Image (cartoon, rainbow, N blue to C red):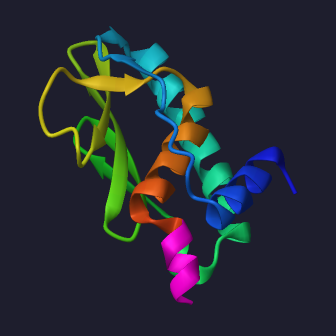
Amino acid sequence: MTPFMFRIAELVGDPREEPVPSTRPSEPQPVGQGADRYVAVRSLAEQLVCEANAVLPPQAALTLSDEVADGRLDFTIACGRHRARVSTTFGGGRSFGRLLRQEQAEGAPVELEDADALPDLIVSLLVEAGAGRLVERA
C-alpha cells in the first residue's frame, strides 16, 4: 500500500483528521502555465482517487468526473453529496484556476497551491462526507 492509502485507511478507522488543503488566491497566468498545472493536478487526482477507492468501502467510494466546456476544463471529485471542483478557464491569452467547494459560495476565488495540496483536499472531502460513519453503517 502507498502512504496515501495508509492515510485513507486510518481516516476510515478514526475520522478525526480534517486537513485544510493549501490554496492561494487565483490570479491570471499564461495559458501554457495554466494548462500544464491543470494536467499535473488532474493526473494526480486520478491516481489518488484510485488509491483511496482501493481501501475505501463501496459506500464511501470517491468519483472523479471531467467536464470540458468552451474555454474551460473542470474535474470534480465527489463522495456522496460532497464535492470539490478544480476548474481552469482559458481566454484572452491567459488562464485562471479555481477551486470550488460547497462551503465556499462567496469570497475571493482561490486555487490549490499546487498538486501537493490534492491529498489534503481528498481527505477533507472524505471527512466532510463522514467516511468513517459510512463504514460504521455497513
Residue situated in front as seen by the camera: 54 or 76:
54
- Is 128 placed above or below 121 here? below
- Is 81 placed above or below 75 here? below
Taking the spot 21% from the left edge, 38% from the top edge, the residue there is 104
Taking the spot 66% from the left edge, 60% from the top edge, the residue there is 52
Taking the spot 53% from the left edge, 48% from the top edge, the residue there is 122
Question: In this rendering, would 138 be left or right of 6?
Answer: left
Q: Position of residue 109 (x, y in %)?
A: 22, 24
- Is 137 placed above or below 90 here? below
Point out the stretch of residues depicted in magenta. 132-138
Majority SS type along the magenta span? helix
Question: In this rendering, would 4 be left or right of 91?
Answer: right
Question: In this rendering, would 18 be left or right of 31?
Answer: right
Taking the spot 25% from the left edge, 35% from the top edge, the residue there is 71
Q: Position of residue 132 (x, y in %)?
A: 55, 68
* Res 6 → quadrant: bottom right
Question: In this rendering, would 87 be left or right of 115?
Answer: left
- Is 13 placed above or below 34 here? below
Tell me the quadrant of the picture where the N terminus can be found: bottom right
The single residue placed furthest to the left in the displayed view is 106
Determine if the magenta segment contains residue 103: no
Determine if the magenta segment contains residue 136: yes
* Res 34 → quadrant: top left
